[in-house]
Image (spheres, grey):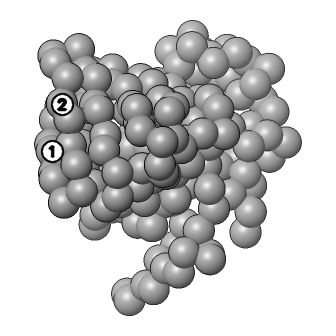
Amino acid sequence: MELGKIIAINLKELRTERNLTLGQLSKISGISKAMLSDIEKGGSNPTINTIWKIANGLNVPYTKLMEGIEKEATIIRKSETVAQNGETEHYRVYCYFRNTPVRNFELFYVELDANSSNASIGHSEKAQEYLYIIQGELVLHTETGDYTLNEGDSLTFDSSIGHTYINENHTLLTFICINYYPN
């Protein structure tokens, strides 16, 4: 099933479970009522930050909006993943594992083009992010400091604060990102 349709189904289900109107969800998420309606009808492919805002408003993990039914053993091929873009085309995220009732993390493969950056709003309270650099150099700017990571380096940080991924080099940056949601 197409990602936009999956998000539409999950958004409507999560919103109605909480007895929220589109107007109420708009107020707590910061997303316009018209945009929420369009997403819920499957007429939109929302950006990463839009999904984060909705997830934060609903107080659920990011991938809860993209959740599908998984088998016991799942192989995910890169060719089967769908690129989600940041606010620009320079930042692409491929979700491999979504948060489920039995998995409290999400695993993403991320690409950031040369000489570009992507700002991410803070995730849910107590969320932690784990990064592993595959190729290139990442400068991570957070509200608490800046960190430079090279190939093979890892970092964990409190992702409930705003953070920006920066690639100051002339080559593609690739990394693994795990979002962890403690119980």
Q: Nearer the viewer, residue 12 or 127?
A: 127
> Can you give x and y, in whole percent of width and height, for residue 167 in the image?
41, 36
Image quarter of the N terminus: bottom right
Image quarter of residue 25: top right
Q: Which residue is mark 1?
A: 155
Q: Nearer the viewer, residue 125 or 79?
A: 79
**Relative side of 130 to 119, left or right:** left
* Residue farthest along the right direction in this orientation: 43
- Dots 2 and 1: beta carbons under 8 Å? yes
Report the residue at 18% width, 30% height from top: 147
Label 2 to label 1: alpha-carbon separation: 9 Å
> Can you give x and y, in whole percent of width and height, for residue 2 in the image?
74, 63
Q: Is residue 22 visible?
A: yes
> Can you give x and y, in whole percent of width and height, for residue 16 in the image?
60, 37
Give the class, few, some or many, for how many residues have Cα within 10 Å of label 1's Cα (few <14, many ≥20).
Answer: some
Q: Secondary structure at mark 1?
A: strand
Report the residue at 70% width, 47% height from top: 8
**Relative side of 166 to 144, left or right:** right
* Residue farthest along the top direction in this orientation: 27
Q: Which residue is mark 2?
A: 147
Q: Is residue 41 visible?
A: no
> Can you give x and y, in whole percent of width and height, for residue 34 in the image?
80, 20
Q: Is residue 87 above or below residue 108?
A: above
Report the residue at 57% width, 14% height from top: 30
Q: Secondary structure at mark 2?
A: strand
The residue type indicated by label 2 comes to Tyr
Q: Is residue 83 above or below residue 47?
A: below
Q: Is residue 62 above or below residue 96?
A: above
Q: How many marks?
A: 2
Image quarter of residue 119: top left
The residue type indicated by label 1 comes to Leu
